[in-house]
Amino acid sequence: MSNTDNDANFDEEIAQLDELSKIIENLEEEPPEPESDKKPDEPTRYKSVALEQCPMMFKPSDNVACKSCILAKWYGNDLSLKCYCRDMYQIVYDSEHTENAVHYCDKFPQSNS
């Protein structure tokens, strides 16, 4: 093997190492943050599966604070819908007595909007 062949092989190996170095550098970089449709000042809203599945006639009005609260435990049957608050330790919504529904709460103020 001549010196020119050795030089060519050496140059090829160096080029391959350079490529591998670039690949490794890219792998070590922090992955980009996923893009979100949510605005930066917009609070995260919780959606209850039970509320989404319950009959329309039992669904609380939009001004009920517990609709989007993560501490709300919604449950019901074919006759009514209720919500138990895991912070206040009481029923805070009853579809049979909606006049007692919570409209404002300090626990998660974003739930009130």
Image (spheres, rainbow, N blue to C red):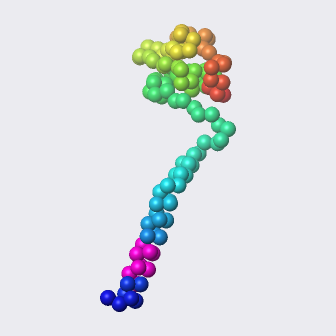
Q: What secondary structure predominates along the stretch shown in magenta?
A: helix
* Residue under the image location 64 percent in, 28 percent down: 110
From this view, report whether residue 13 is shown above or below residue 26: below
Q: Is residue 67 visible?
A: no
In the image: residue 45, left or right of residue 48: right
Residue 14 is one of the magenta-drawn residues: yes
In the rendered image, is residue 34 in sight?
A: yes
Q: Which residues are magenta?
A: 8-16
Quadrant of the snapshot with the C terminus: top right
Residue 23 drawn above or below residue 9? above
Camera-side residue of 113 and 76 = 113
Residue found 46% across the figure and 28% down from its top: 49
- Residue 23 x %, y %: 46, 63
Residue 37, horizontal then vertical, whole percent:
59, 45
Instruction: Identify the image quadrant of residue 85.
Output: top right
Q: Residue 3: which quarter of the image?
A: bottom left
- The answer to whether residue 88 is above or below residue 56 is above
Does the segment drawn in magenta span residue 67? no
